[in-house]
Image (cartoon, rainbow, N blue to C red):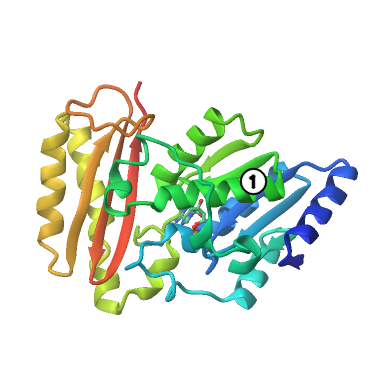
Amino acid sequence: MEIVSRIADLRARVAQARQAGRTVGFVPTMGYLHEGHLTLMRQAKEAHGVVVASIFVNPLQFGPKEDFASYPRDLERDSQMAAAAGVDVLFAPDVKEMYPGGFENMLAFVDVRDVTEHLCGASRPGHFRGVATVVTKLFNIVEPDAAYFGQKDAQQVVVIRRMAEDLNMRVRIVAVPIVREADGLAMSSRNVYLNPAERQAALVLIKSLRLAEQSFMAGERNAPQIIAQMRRLIEQEPLATVDYISISDPNNLENVAEIGGSALVALAVRIGKTRLIDNLLWEGQ
Ligand code: AMP
């Protein structure tokens, strides 16, 4: 595996792969890799001659009070894990390479309306503008045939799909199911922030999703009822504070009242200072 930090070098390496007739799969990440990221990489490797993964903690998608500075970083460890997962080229630019004039001085952005305004968009203003903009930059740098995203960030998948569709991006967007710890906690780089008591408390997210599933299986179709049950369960955990719980149409993320077709049950919960997200997708018949 090659580690590349310059855009020009990455472009040259991808051009070489294309000349050799290979297709390019791309996995954008913020690093501090775990089994969720590695699953995306392995899946990309199954479908493509060359896999490019990026590690870039993007300042543009963090709010002023968020964890940009403290976000976990370990390139040495990440590069070993990425190599073992089959990544051919690891693109790890610094902030100056991605934003030579400073990210604060950017004039052009990619704004996706509506689907960015619900769920995480409501409590993280500007987050999805930062995501859509950096993903566009990365797509323009790598020019992949396909890009792999985790269903863990369900809203991100909707935003990126809509962006690629509306702006005629040539890339195919592939969504990969959530990878979980043995006890059900969705894997996340931010899980490293949790102390042992918080790690235990973090199980309320999956417990509340399981409760929603049970309720749905028992015939409940009223979304506010299911949300209320989930909220009651989470409120019993002293270390947990609900940011949002929503049941929405997975295509446009509009809230649904009565569940008819497919539905996305999504939530964000603060465990101590750490904000965690999780979700569950009900495919309609
Ligand atoms: P991040 O480094 O957190 O920005 O994540 C990079 C990519 O990995 C995103 O597409 C995430 O949705 C995906 N990802 C993160 N955690 C998981 C997980 N537990 N299961 C599946 N995909 C994940």
Q: Amino acid at mark 1?
A: Phe
| Left or right of 41 on screen, residue 214 | left
Q: Residue 92: x and y, percent? A: 65, 66
Front-lying residue, 183 or 258: 258
Disc 1 packing (10 Å; few <14; some 14–19; many ≥20)? many
Measuring 54% from the left and 29% from the top, which residue is drawn there?
165
Residue at 34% from the left image edge and 24% from the top image edge: 284
**Image quadrant occupied by the C terminus:** top left
Ligand 1 has an atom within 8 Å of the beta carbon of the residue at disc 1: no
Residue lying farthest to the right in this orientation: 20
Is 67 rendered above or below residue 236? below
Residue sitting at 39 percent across and 29 percent down?
A: 251
Q: Residue 16 location, x and y as percent?
A: 87, 50
Secondary structure of residue under mark 1: helix
> Could you tell me which quadrant the N terminus lies in?
bottom right
Residue bearing the label numbered 1: 139
Q: Vertically, is 258 above or below 280?
A: above
- In depth, the one of 218 and 83 nearer the eye is 83
Q: Is residue 231 above or below residue 89?
A: above
| Residue 151 position within the rendered picture, expressed as x and y whole percent measured from the top left | 45, 45
Instruction: Report the residue at 17% width, 38% height from top.
Output: 215
The quadrant in which residue 38 appears is bottom right
Count of marks, rendered view: 1
Specify whether 53 is left or right of 102.
right
Left or right, residue 202 beside residue 55? left
- Viewer can see residue 43: no
